[in-house]
Amino acid sequence: MSSKKNLSDNYGSDTAPQSKLIECIDLYGNYASTTNHVYFGFNEDRELSQFNQETTIYFLQATDTTYGYMEVRAEAPGIWSLRVGMNSQGIAISGNGLPESSINVHPEKTYTRSYHNFYKIVLESTGNISDVIELIDNFDFGSSISAQIHIADAQGNALVLSPGSDGEMEITHKVADYLVSTNTNQLKEKALMNDLRYLSATHPLKESITKQSVLTALDYSKRLFKAGCIRIGDVLFDII
């Protein structure tokens, strides 16, 4: 096993604050696949006053050892800045704020720093969900986490990584035509069924599949707005 690496982190503090919720369905990493497309999207519902500059799109060139990638960032004092990103292999990643959870520390694992740096490593070094799972197995996320992480690849595979009740990070895999992640822990099924954000996000997707109808990104956005979603920005990738 390789030695543990204390990797540099340019994305802010180790503890990202929980998103301040306003009247909105938060759809970070809301994801669906069809025969010809794999979509990965998110929306931002933090108040603009929390940020010290406008959202910016960055393009990072590939090197001899890393993939090239793009990311959408909104800088804010004390708040980690990476909102959503996609690399040249079709790996897309985003996350949702959750109440802070204590997790088990694993100093024996290869990579350490914080889950914020995990985003950067995913974009630089993984090409599919199998690569991501291998990275997760070798990553020490520290002693606490206040988010869950949503990742998809160009083959239509996706997962959500969440803190479990036993202090370990656990994976929820996509088993249907879509995988939706909101500000409710993906492992808490009963809570999800009472989460307006989750229900509002999944209903149009289920309906489209049942009726075998086409649900465009614009139509989906309109449906969310009618459901009471007030948001300051949306991003959608077609990652094939």
Image: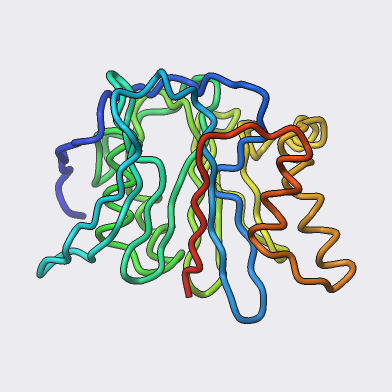
Image coordinates of residue 156 in percent, x first then y, are 56, 70
- Depth check, front residue: 67 or 39: 39
**Considering depth in this image, is 224 or 8 the residue closer to the camera?**
224
Which quadrant is the N terminus positioned in?
bottom left
For residue 200, which quarter of the picture?
top right
Q: Reply above or below: 221 against 127.
A: above
In the figure, 187 relative to 17: above or below? below
From the viewer's perspective, tell me whether residue 11 is left or right of residue 104.
Answer: left
In this rendering, position of residue 76 left or right of residue 225: left
Report which quarter residue 127 is drawn in: bottom left
Q: Name the residue nearer the viewer: 32 or 59.
A: 59
In front of the other: 170 or 189: 189
At horizontal 48% and vertical 62% (from top left) the residue drawn is 237
Left or right for 138, reference 33: left
* Quarter holding residue 140: top left
Going 25% across and 51% down the picture, which residue do you hit?
58
